[in-house]
Amino acid sequence: MDPKYRHEWKHVLNTGDLLILRQRLRAVMESDPHAIDGKYYIRSLYFDNPDDKALREKIDGVNMREKFRIRLYNCDSSVIHLEKKSKRNGLGTKYSAVLTAEQAQKIVDGDIDWMLGSDHPLIQELYCKMRYQGMRPKTIVDYTREPFIFRPGNVRVTLDYDIRTGLGCTDFLNPDAVTIPAGDAPILIEVKWDEFLPSIIRDLVSIPDRRVGSFSKYAQCRIYG
């Protein structure tokens, strides 16, 4: 089955925008049921090769690109996902596979032979890219997310802020791993939808003088190297 690509765009916000949008979204959209008090804490570990292929393709605006990451929420290592995000012609899709904490730690440690025997093609794909392209864990990316959903159009709106980088740290499962603010990382709103974006949501997320742009948390978290 071909992957389903979704429309997505991002705006960079200031604190005033965040306060306005938070109230608007709460009035119309549902909070994601997985959120705790309306938000959750996300930790991702991004991968790249020795030539920083994923980083360079993002910076250069390559039309077809992909990136791999391992992700968990609220420091809960009982649910960990390996994800591959792909972009094509401005549309995005995501592939996902569940990992145990032990499997995630093995990937971080470079113990990858077991991945070839996995029955999940995404784990096998990452194995091949680690084995033959030198792909390795690069940095931790932490941030806080406030997620909202609107069922018509399968719309998802998120407010992301407090983006922090682990620099060269890849100790993904260590809740005490040190991260620092990723430079002057902005507040972001991300909007994703399938075939159509309902006008009520389009109006909700419209902020004067805020243009749709491209922003990568991973690229922001690589600003120090």
Image (tube, rainbow, N blue to C red):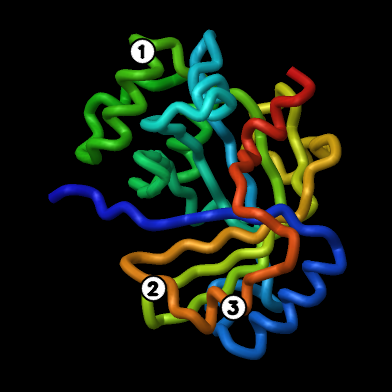
| Residue located at (38% from left, 82% from top) | 152
Question: Residue under circle 2?
Answer: 154
Position of residue 165 measured from the top left corner of the image (x, y, whole percent): 75, 35
Q: Contact, CB < 8 Å: mark 3 with mark 2?
A: no
Q: For the residue marked with disc 2, what is the amino acid? A: Asn
Which mark lies nearer to you, 3 or 1?
3
| Earlier residue among tags 1 and 2 | 1
Q: Residues within 10 Å of mark 3 (few under 14, many from 20)?
A: few
Question: Residue under circle 3?
Answer: 203
Question: Residue under circle 1?
Answer: 131
User: 220 and 145: which one is in front?
Assistant: 220
In the image, taking residue 209 as reference, residue 122 lies left or right, namely left
Q: For the residue marked with disc 1, what is the amino acid? A: Arg
Q: Residue 40 lies in what quarter of the image?
A: bottom right
| Separation of marks 3 and 2 at Cα, in angstroms | 16 Å
In the image, taking residue 220 as reference, residue 93 lies left or right, namely left
Q: For the residue marked with disc 3, what is the amino acid? A: Asp
Q: Is residue 142 above or below residue 153?
A: above
| Residue located at (60% from left, 69% from top) | 147
Q: In the rendered image, is residue 144 in sight?
A: yes
User: 108 and 219: which one is in front?
Assistant: 219
Tag 3 secondary structure:
helix
Tag 1 secondary structure:
helix
| Residue located at (35% from left, 27% from top) | 126
Q: In the rendered image, is residue 173 in sight?
A: no
| Earlier residue among tags 3 and 2 | 2
Quarter holding the C terminus is top right
